[in-house]
Image: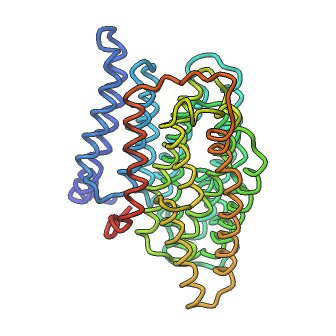
Amino acid sequence: MQEIDLEALKVSIHGVVPEIGLGIVAATIVLCNLFKPLNRISFFVAIIGIVVYLLNIGFGEAFKVIMCMSALATIVISGRRQSMEFYLLIIFVLLGAVVLVMSTNFIMILLSIEMISISSYVLTAGTTPDRHRAEAAWKFFIYGSVATAVMVFGMTYLYGATGSLAFPHVDQTSLLFTVGGLMMLGGFLFKMTAAPFHLWAPTVYEATPAPIVAFLSVVPKLAGFVIVVKWITSLNSTVTIAAVAILSIVVGTLAALNQTDSKRMMAYSSVAQAGFLLIIPASSIHFSVAIFYATVFAIMNFVVFLVINEIEKSGKGTSFKNFSGIGNSNPLIAVCITLGLISLAGLPPTAGFMAKLFIFSGLWSKFHTSKDFIFLALFIVGLLATAASLYFYLRIPFYAFFRRSEENQPIKISLLTNLLLVILVGLLLALFLAPGLFDGLSY
């Protein structure tokens, strides 16, 4: 019988103490709900728990910090009137995401992905009867279940080929290994909303409240991205990732061109943005670019969805026409969403411009060094998609400033929302001027 290495076990447990703390936060929220005098403090327990987790991990682990800040922003935007289940599910998605970022073992990868997935399905469905949200959650669940089943099947192939549950570090040429690797990659790309694993996204984005969509568009995507980076490092499958990047950019951009609803447009935008993220590991661009792009992506998404949330709460719909006239009635939120969309398009003077510039300059340098056609293809497709995206990203600003609304009453925006928007837009402008703040950070 093999002896247990207590010292190694002690070191392992010590390394996940902050994550154990997040689990304790979730248990505390459940306990608070058992006692009526305490069930209103779930909001504060969730915020304090995430802040304590941030203080324990420090700010060197960039992707964990981005995920935590996204969770905090979602909770603050949603307010104190949410049910206990809402805060609990946000913590569970966050916990699954940070564990996934740390994982190098198939079992831990599966457990963390399932924690993210199941919590995301319930967040999409909500706790009150709603036919549209229920339909979206079922579609999300069906696609997610199939993706997980395929991924687990791939894991069994990889285990059969390598005899280990750890990430393989040596590329193999056997058919069993190749098929298993591709099947497992599919599960990771589903979390990133990359094509062709994106079909659930438009329905889920359209039916789910904007703060939840903002959260789900950032945290699972970034967790999936980190695990894809580790997978590429293990298998050296850059050509496959480059092909997926091109497909995601093309499909996301072309589908977004025909949208008339802001949420569906952002769903396809997310597909295209996943493609741009995948360019980074596919072309071996420095990882600090990935951290910068991920940070800017999270900020851009929350700016846009925060304004969409205010439009929704005012009783309007989320089609482009519902933004008509807000440039006159609510100039602050109109300017903020314009800057957020300009940043998504990759125009100056926003951080989105610098993020795209780093990617394109890295691609060109890689092509110039290697003379590999795949890098030139990524460069051309990325440039054409960026130019085409101006059409759908700038439609909302067009309606906001150049179309009049029949209702000229300003939307009532809370001071907290205005403050958050100003801070986030300020960060987009500041990171345009100082993009080198992320050098030396890790995932």
Can you say which quadrant of the picture contains the C terminus? bottom left
Q: Quadrant of residue 329?
A: top right
- In the picture as drawn, the residue positioned furthest to the top comes out as 36
The image shows residue 222 at horizontal and vertical percentages of 49, 54
Q: Above or below — where is 269 with respect to 372?
A: above
* Residue in the image at 62% along x and 54% along y: 187
Residue 177 in view (yes/no): no
**Image-based side of 296 in relation to 345, left or right:** left
Q: Above or below — where is 425 with respect to 44?
A: below
- Between 164 and 426, the one lying in front of the other is 426
Total label count? 0
- Between 21 and 94, the one lying in front of the other is 94
Q: Quadrant of residue 140?
A: top right
* Residue in the image at 64% along x and 75% along y: 379
Can you say which quadrant of the picture contains the N terminus? bottom left
**Image-based side of 71 in relation to 179, left or right:** left
* Residue in the image at 54% along x and 24% along y: 410
* Residue in the image at 55% along x and 84% along y: 366
Color encoding of the figure:
rainbow
The image shows residue 246 at horizontal and vertical percentages of 69, 67
The image shows residue 122 at horizontal and vertical percentages of 56, 29
- In the picture as drawn, the residue positioned furthest to the right comes out as 258
Residue 426 in view (yes/no): yes
Q: Above or below — where is 138 with respect to 355?
A: above
**Image-based side of 91 in relation to 237, left or right:** left
Q: Above or below — where is 148 with respect to 231?
A: above
- Between 246 and 18, the one lying in front of the other is 246
The image shows residue 428 at horizontal and vertical percentages of 43, 54
